[in-house]
Image: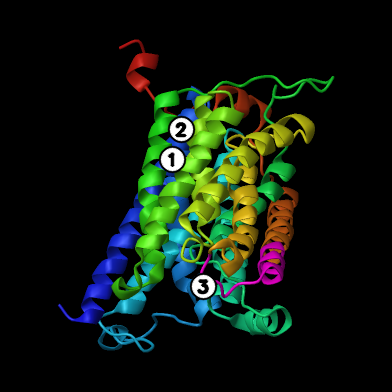
């Protein structure tokens, strides 16, 4: 197999691993929501992936990289400077990242969002908002990276998407959660928080495990080719994951939801600097992310009264922001890292992504709320999205007494 063919195979396996992570998103959500909303969670995650594929193929990939596939088949294998159809599998790999945006948001808006308005929002975000920032960082569009380099001494470094994917997804979810409002019964009139218990802890744990395994494709294969693959990225991902879960275990007082999401917080945070930080730095990044998720979740739910069901704002948004900034700290040679980064470039690049996400989320979900409406009716929400939207429950035979 020639080197180009091997790179195509390498990236195809990475794309398949990240595609499998969407099953993790689905089961993490299914285990967290109430039983009457499990089917809806499954259907939204897989159909969001389908609509994201169409949106990114026809619009988003071109917005980010200026590449499209509207050419005869005889020319597709050699688009750009690549051969063996590399750019096509590169699209597949990056699509799985783009499709993670609505999958992340899904966890925040679940149990009360209408189906087709949610589809419309997902299409707009994957076609336009996400690839705009993706192109700024990973394609050098509009001279943003060149400006950071000339102003602060380095480009913004985000190897596998702490900010480009996760902080974007988490803070886009902020606009959606804010516009939707809380689930019925979540908060009392005097400000108390009513517990809404998860339906299935084993499903929640399964979702976390699937995501953890797939994440090594997410991170290691972000190198883009087999020659660039690095064992440093693998061990840093491992240690950050472990740091996040152990820190969340302690800070969350053995709560299984915090433990399983703490592992994910560590993985979110290490994406940006996984190729440049020392393994001890990766462990530290994961520990901070795990603790940050626990206290961030409590802050958002109890103080800010934002009903972010799965905690995607602190998990992806907060940990992603921390990961972008942390790469500028632990990636420096003074902290044992490989260097080539500056704290200010990481700070400005990260805050730019967060700002675009918050503004984009408020704009898109606000416009849809005004024109179409976002939320299920009170009756449908009480019945549950499974019966209201899909006319079937998660366990039809049991519910029929069969």
Colour treatment of the image = rainbow
Tell me if residue 22 comes above or below residue 160 in the rendering.
Answer: above
Marks 2 and 3 sit apart, C-alpha to C-alpha, by 31 Å
* Residue linked to disc 3: 59
Marks 2 and 1 close (CB-CB < 8 Å): yes
Is residue 40 visible in this depiction of the protein? no
Marks 1 and 3 sit apart, C-alpha to C-alpha, by 26 Å
Q: Nearer the viewer, residue 126 or 6?
A: 6
The disc at residue 30 is 2
Bin the neighbour count of mark 2 within 10 Å (Cα to Cα): few under 14, some 14-19, many 20 and up: many
User: Residue 168, percent across and down?
Assistant: 61, 58
Tell me if residue 99 comes above or below residue 352 in the rendering.
Answer: above
Q: What is the tally of numbered marks visible in this picture?
A: 3
Place residue 115 in its image quadrant: top right
Is residue 193 visible in this depiction of the protein? yes
Bin the neighbour count of mark 3 within 10 Å (Cα to Cα): few under 14, some 14-19, many 20 and up: many
Taking the view exactly as shown, the residue that stands out farthest to the left is 1
The disc at residue 26 is 1
Identify which residue is drawn at 66% across, 44% down: 374
User: Residue 158, percent across and down?
Assistant: 55, 66
Identify which residue is drawn at 74% across, 60% down: 359
Q: Which residues are magenta?
A: 337-351
The question of residue 349 being in magenta is answered with yes
The kind of secondary structure the magenta stretch mainly shows is helix
Marks 2 and 3 close (CB-CB < 8 Å): no
Q: What secondary structure is found at the residue carrying circle 3? A: helix
Is 303 placed left or right of 261 in the picture?
right
Taking the view exactly as shown, the residue that stands out farthest to the right is 190
Q: Earlier in the sequence, mark 1 or mark 3?
A: 1
User: Residue 83, percent across and down?
Assistant: 28, 85
Marks 1 and 3 close (CB-CB < 8 Å): no
């Amino acid at each position: 197999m020639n080197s180009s063919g091997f790179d195509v195979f390498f990236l195809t396996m990475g794309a398949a691993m990240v595609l499998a992570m969407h099953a993790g998103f689905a089961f993490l959500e299914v285990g967290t929501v109430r039983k009457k909303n499990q089917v809806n969670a499954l259907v939204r995650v897989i159909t969001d992936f389908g609509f994201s594929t169409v949106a990114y193929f026809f619009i988003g990939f071109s917005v980010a990289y200026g590449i499209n596939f509207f050419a005869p088949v005889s020319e597709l294998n050699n688009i750009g400077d690549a051969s063996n159809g590399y750019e096509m599998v590169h699209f597949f790999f990056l699509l799985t990242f783009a499709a993670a945006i609505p999958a992340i948001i899904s966890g925040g808006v679940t149990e009360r969002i209408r189906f087709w308005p949610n589809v419309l929002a997902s299409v707009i975000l994957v076609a336009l908002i996400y690839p705009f920032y993706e192109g700024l960082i990973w394609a050098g569009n509009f001279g943003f990276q060149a400006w950071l380099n000339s102003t602060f001494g380095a480009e913004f470094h985000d190897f596998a998407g702490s900010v480009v994917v996760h902080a974007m997804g988490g803070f886009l979810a902020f606009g959606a959660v804010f516009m939707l409002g809380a689930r019925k019964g979540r908060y009392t009139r005097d400000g108390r928080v009513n517990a809404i218990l998860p339906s299935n802890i084993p499903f929640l744990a399964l979702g976390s495990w699937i995501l953890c395994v797939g994440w090594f494709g997410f991170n290691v294969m972000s190198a883009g080719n087999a020659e660039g693959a690095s064992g440093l990225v693998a061990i840093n991902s491992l240690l950050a994951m472990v740091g996040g879960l152990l820190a969340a275990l302690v800070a969350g007082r053995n709560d299984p939801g915090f433990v399983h999401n703490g592992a994910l917080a560590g993985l979110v945070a290490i994406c940006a600097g996984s190729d440049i930080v020392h393994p001890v730095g990766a462990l530290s990044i994961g520990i901070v992310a795990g603790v940050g998720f626990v206290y961030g979740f409590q802050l958002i739910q109890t103080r800010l009264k934002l009903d972010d069901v799965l905690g995607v704002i602190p998990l992806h948004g907060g940990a992603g922001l921390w990961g972008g900034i942390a790469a500028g700290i632990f990636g420096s040679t003074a902290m044992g890292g490989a260097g080539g980064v500056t704290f200010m470039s990481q700070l400005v690049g990260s805050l730019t992504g967060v700002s675009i996400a918050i503004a984009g989320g408020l704009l898109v979900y606000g416009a849809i709320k005004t024109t179409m409406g976002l939320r299920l009716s009170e009756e449908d929400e009480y019945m549950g999205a499974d019966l209201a939207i899909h006319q079937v429950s998660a366990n039809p035979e049991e519910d029929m007494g069969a």
